Image: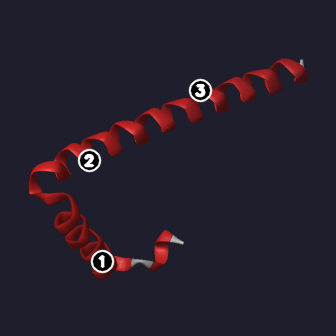
Amino acid sequence: MLSNIGVPGLILILVIALVIFGPKKLPEIGRAFGETLREFKKSTKGLRDEVLEELDENKK
């Protein structure tokens, strides 16, 4: 889905976000999005590690 956007689409999205939220609010939104994404990745990695650990225990 996101692979079809391309560079012009990303630029358009950034311009629209800039118009809607303004230049002062945009860095805060980006930071919050980054922190959310980081937390999501950390959670999924933890879940994956738990599942792999369970599978290893079941093999023994």
Q: Is residue 15 above or below residue 33?
A: below
Question: Could you say whether the residue bearing mark 2 is in a helix, strand or loop?
Answer: helix
Residue 59 sits in which quadrant?
Answer: top right
Q: Which mark is residue 26?
A: none
Quadrant into which the N terminus falls: bottom right
Name the residue rendered at 41%, 77% in the picture: 5
Q: Is residue 27 above or below residue 11?
A: above
Q: Is residue 7 above or below residue 43?
A: below
Name the residue rendered at 65%, 29% in the picture: 47
Position of residue 34 in the picture relative to residue 39 (left or right): left
Which residue matches tag 1? Answer: 7
Which sits in the foreground, 13 or 47? 13
Q: Residue 42, image x and y in percent?
A: 49, 31
Q: Residue 60, image x and y in percent?
A: 89, 17
* Distance in Å between CA atoms under marks 3 and 2: 26 Å
Question: Could you say whether the residue bearing mark 1 is in a helix, strand or loop?
Answer: helix
Kindly report which numbered mark, 2 or 1, lies closer to the viewer in this rendering. 2
Question: Could you say whether the residue bearing mark 3 is in a helix, strand or loop?
Answer: helix
Name the residue rendered at 31%, 40% in the picture: 32
Name the residue rendered at 89%, 21% in the picture: 58
How packed mark 1 is, by other alpha carbons closer than 10 Å (few <14, some 14-19, many 20 or more), is few
Which residue matches tag 3? Answer: 46
Query: Counting residues from the N terminus, which is met first, the one under dot 2 or under dot 1?
Result: 1
